Image (spheres, rainbow, N blue to C red):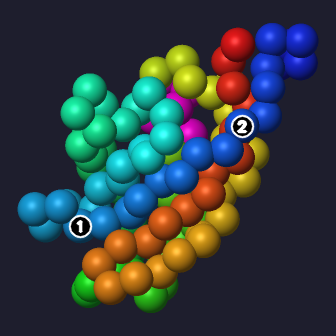
Amino acid sequence: MNLATSHRKTAVVILAVIKGTPSIHFCDTRLSGADNNLWMPVNTTGITLSPVAEKIERSHIHAAIEQIMTINNVAHNVVHVEEIKREKGYLDYRVTYNEIA
């Protein structure tokens, strides 16, 4: 990675079940969609979301978020995923990543 063209940034991501499918939504990046309502399904092996998983592998969420961000040229990589809020029906994560300049 070229540090001259990479900058560490953070974003907030929501994990929720949308129409029966575990999905994530990017709140403050261009991945939020044109109408700020884009949800992307994620493969969260081994979790039950009722209403939101008590047992969730952060590595699965990290990998899913990183894959979406890198394939869409938003990030070189995701450095850290931290749960910041847990409510009935959703989880919020703070994602730290190296931005593509």
Please tell me whether residue 27 is drawn above or below residue 34 in the rendered image: below
Task: Determine whether, in the image, residue 57 is placed left or right of residue 2.
Answer: left
Q: Which residues are magenta?
A: 66-71
Q: Residue at x 44, y 27 (%)?
A: 30
For the residue pair 27 and 20, the one nearer the viewer reads as 27
Residue 90 position within the rendered picture, expressed as x and y whole percent measured from the top left:
36, 73
Residue 10 position within the rendered picture, expressed as x and y whole percent measured from the top left:
67, 44
Q: Is residue 67 magenta?
A: yes
Where is the C terminus found, in terms of image quarters?
Answer: top right
C-alpha span from label 2 to label 1: 26 Å
For residue 65, which numbered disc appears in the image? Answer: none
Task: Determine whether, in the image, residue 76 is placed left or right of residue 41.
Answer: right
Q: Is residue 24 magenta?
A: no
Type of amino acid at the residue the image marks with label 1:
Val
Please tell me whether residue 6 is drawn above or below residue 55 in the rendered image: above
Tell me the SS state at disc 1. strand
Does the image show residue 58? Answer: yes
Q: Residue at x 66, y 65 (%)?
A: 82
- Give residue 59's quadrant in the image: bottom right
Tell me the SS state at disc 2. strand
For residue 9, which numbered disc appears in the image? Answer: 2
Q: Which residue is mark 1?
A: 17
Q: Kindly report the secondary structure that dominates the magenta region of the rendered protein.
A: helix
